[in-house]
Amino acid sequence: MTDGQLEPAAPDEGSIDLLTAALRRDAADLEAYTRVLAGALADALPADAVTVGRKRGLADRMAGRPGRIERLDVSTDGQRLSLTVTGGRAAAEVCQVVRGVVLSRRPVPLDEWTRELAAALTARARSDARAREALERLLLGDR
């Protein structure tokens, strides 16, 4: 790079593994998992990078609750990671995106989706202080 700038380091396997483990921590309870994940991602990424789709029943509306998260989309550089939760089951996919157009969709197991997400977040945290702080809180369990 020029002008004395340092090139950002590539994410190392240790930090990706640690973040993957932290992201998986609540995966047994999908509702809690998506809620915690959505909150952490909202802190770590720009507002337009995270889209949360919710389902609000009558009881949720009456109680003023936001409802259950049914879909979580995370857009990173050239990729969209989608997680859909229906009937207590998760369906995950990794999409390759160029200029807003999805070129490919690849259904993946939740563990692989989590690892892809961890790699994308780790790479972003290398150059974004806000993302780095949010990920540190996630790793330390301060949710």
Image: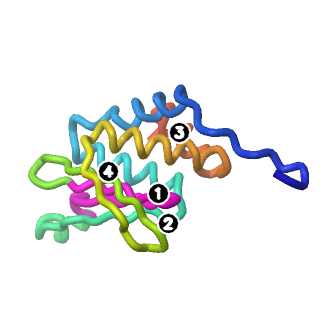
Q: Which mark is residue 134?
A: none
Percent of width and height locating residue 104:
33, 61
* Magenta stretch contains residue 57: no
Q: Which residue is mark 3?
A: 137
Percent of width and height locating residue 141:
45, 33
Q: Residues within 10 Å of mark 4 (few under 14, many from 20)?
A: some
The answer to whether marks 4 and 1 mark residues whose Cβ atoms lie closer than 8 Å is no
The Cα atoms of the two marked residues, 4 and 3, are separated by 15 Å
The Cα atoms of the two marked residues, 1 and 2, are separated by 7 Å
The Cα atoms of the two marked residues, 1 and 3, are separated by 13 Å
Percent of width and height locating residue 41:
45, 52
Q: Which mark is residue 42?
A: 1
The answer to whether marks 1 and 2 mark residues whose Cβ atoms lie closer than 8 Å is yes
Question: Which amino acid type is shown beneath numbered disc 2?
Answer: Ala
Question: Which amino acid type is shown beneath numbered disc 3?
Answer: Arg
The Cα atoms of the two marked residues, 3 and 2, are separated by 18 Å
Q: Which residue is mark 4?
A: 35
The Cα atoms of the two marked residues, 4 and 1, are separated by 11 Å
Q: Which mark is residue 47?
A: 2
Name the main secondary structure of what is drawn in magenta. strand
Q: Nearer the viewer, residue 26 or 75?
A: 75
Question: Which amino acid type is shown beneath numbered disc 1?
Answer: Ala
First reached walking from the N terminus: tag 1 or tag 3: 1
* Residue at the extreme top of the image, as rendered: 14
